[in-house]
Image (spheres, grey):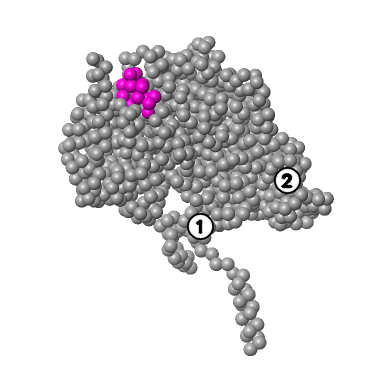
Amino acid sequence: MAAVAAAELLGAGLLGEVQEENVQDPQPRDVLGCERIDRLLELFRYPSISSSYAGQEAHWTADSDVDDNLKDDITPKQRPAVIQLSSRSSSSFQSSPGKTSLLYFLTALCLLPPVHGGKGSAAVWIDTDARFSAQHLSRVMRSILRGRIQEQVNESTDLNTAQEIESTVSSSLAQLHVIKPTSSSALLTSLAQLPTHLLSSSASFNLPIGIIILDSANAFHYQDRQASELARLSSYPSMAGPSTATSTHSPLTPPTSESVITALKAIQSIFDCTLAFTTRTTVPSSSAHRSFSMSNNQHPTSLWTSFADLTLHLTRLPIPTFPHSMTLDDCLRDKRRRQQALATGRVRVSVDLDSAGPARRNQLKGTAGAGFVIRANRPGDRALLPTLSKPQINPKSDLSDLSDLNPVSSSKMSSAPRYTTVPTYSSKILVRGTPDYERCRRNNPTADTADRYPQEIHVVESPEDVVVALKRATELGVHVGVRSSGHIMNLPMIHQDGILIDTVNLNRSVDYNPKTHEICFGPSIRVEEVEGALRKVKRFFPHGHAPTVGAGGFLLAGGQGWFVRGWGATNETWINKIEIVVPDGRVLIASAEENEDLFWAARGSGLAFFGVITRFWCATIRPSIMWERTFKFDIRDKYEALMTFFIERGRDTPRYRTDLNLTIDYPEKYDPAYTTDDIPPNRTLHMTLNLLCYTDTIREARTLLSAWDRMPPAVRECLIEARPIEERTFQEVFARKRGFLGNAGKDRWQINSIINHPDVHTARLVEGIKPCMLDLPTRTSSVFMCFVDIYPDEKETCISLPQELYISTITGWTDPKLEPAIYQPMRNHYRNAFSVANGQYITELDVNNEDANCKVLTDTALARLLEIRAKYDPNELFPNYKKFVQTHDKINKLEAQAKL
């Protein structure tokens, strides 16, 4: 009996040590001991289990013939984490902004014992940049230890504690191995010998390897390039006669990045350790020829990026220059604050979502975060370790921020964002009063959701689901609204007690026909998804400029797509046919050959359209290269000169394949030090010109944008920054757009716009829109203006107003207490600009307030639209057309009064 009892006791003890795990359990998060980066690694390396498997029991089989495809459904053991820290600089010798400081912090956490928040592991630092400093690392470790000890004892450190700190630092540093290769060949040799050294009895390590640092991966780029050139020259036949060499490979040829990465992978497989490496991209000078930048000798940054699980971009936050309007006394008063900002050395760390791969990019946008800000102080400063600045939204992303940069604690992941482009709901039909209903109702780019509540929200996935929703609305006798992405900020699709059809899951893919070069997609596919799909098949289609805008609203409104000046609105010539569910439940194809009236109405009626679009078929062309030239000006008292310069030079620029844009904003809009809606004290406004074109060569680009070489003295004296023509990608522009019109949790937006009248002289136009351009009511408000040069044929499309310039003001705020007063200032300004307007862009017609509304179609186009609408929607399921009629009647009366 005693033996049985002892066996039971032993069995119970062993069972207590067993930890049950499920395939849906989260993967380990504590990789580096740095909560922010560990959370990002978790998101990028351990994708959440598909919702289709949620709640299902895992069934295991020992059958050796199990389908290999099923292996992907089981989360495998991930290879050790690989992190890339990247930055851009104008010089190959320029100091990396904050990357090494962040590496010091990660290394310190790796080396320090667990009792002080570290990992208690060994580390290897490969110092190819010859910048490693053990003194710097020890200072970081002391700073962490002081903070930890003070948290534990809640009092200042005494002499004994100081001795304990030094002892801990010394013992931790003993677990660090530093390698200083001086060439790529030496680096590869060191990597080959490293496992043998670390595993030998002579090595001083007695702990597992936690992290390997490579600072930096492209340190020998120019050295290798020279060696490659020498090797290439040595392979040429000599002047004396044919070469007798039998080998095609020169011993002078340096190792490739592939071989270095292969060696690093081998080391990781042996020691199961994290790898962190840095890269630096050198911005080419204006004289650099494109063929040089695209040569085979360029450092293959993309290869290193594809190797990394997580890529973080580090950018030093600029210190604003003194505005010209500031007096000397103002500058002196501002001196200390600017010196403190400079000494702090703030660096923004942003997440490269492209490194996640296209399949999960949209999911990560809602959870990965915009990054964080660290302070990379000068050597000798106590606070060398990165510390979090006030939580901010990255100007280059519309994603939510993460929590503090701290060693891992028990805190939970941040809650789901308010707005996401890939939401999931518990049902296709959401009823009022349920959590999913309200979450769906509020899932709009602006947090300012109107107090209107549909009876039901139908999250449709097929034309059949749309038919069900329309039938339900007919039974209830209520109105219908349709949402593709919700970027019409006054939310005309939400009707009180109506039916909201959300198309977020309707044909959410891009299909490409390689024979016809035609693409097919649903109404809620986002601009960035279309661009990504086209990039894979090497085709181009003039999609929108803002990455999260849905195709449905973009194309119904007309489509001010890329390079619109040359080929007109996207819906004029690029749409081949459309699949539409009309109010009586029929699923129709509309094109130039069938249901022509429906095809005409769908292209330009915008929010007044009377059906639900389920698919578009559009044409594509061969892609080219996008180029950009930029200017930034301090407006001061030179508004008239600057605005006239933009308008006149734009008219001098060829229309075909050019895209000319102007923005005005406060520079503090993007400064994380500012967190309120208040207008900055200095009220300085900057005007930025982003001038783009789409050509095969930089020579063609210079020709297309040559009109901007001529700059009057009054304009030149306001110039802050000018960048020469340089190659640009759509992804880079999308990143910029995210900050310009972000969709974070608190962002609230109102957009007002006009289209200039072609008969109004430039001087009168510039004066007429001046308050709209300069009287920005909040810090985050902006002006956006661009040349569109759309001159449509009313016989072909509903879009009918001539459009030269699109002129808009985006009012931004975060404090709901500013409402409703915040709406009115810009409404008044745009109402006063009616005299220089030919109409407004259809997406900015405000269904909530008539003050700033003006015509969106010609009177004859509106009359034809109403006739077609009555044919297809006699029961008026779709009521927004009434707003068009009200606005047109108002403007016609005003015009009649003006003629008296």
Q: Residue 143, which numbered label?
A: 2
Query: Relative to 153, is 348 above or below?
Result: above
Closer to the camera, 872 or 204? 872
- The reply, left or right, for residue 277 in relation to residue 535 is right
Quadrant occupied by the C terminus: top left
Instruction: Name the residue type under label 2.
Output: Ser
Q: Position of residue 810 (x, y in %)?
A: 43, 30
SS for tag 2? helix
Q: Residue 865, which numbered label?
A: none
Question: Where are the magenta residues, as a range?
Answer: 827-840
Q: Of callouts 1 and 2, which one flags the residue occurring earlier in the amino acid sequence? A: 1
Q: Which residue is mark 1?
A: 75
Among the 4 quarters of the image, the one containing residue 488: top left
Q: Position of residue 252 (x, y in %)?
A: 68, 34
Residue found at x 45% / y 46%: 418
- The reply, left or right, for residue 592 in relation to residue 256 is left
Mark 2 surroundings within 10 Å by alpha-carbon count, few (fewer than 14), some (14 through 19), many (20 or more):
some
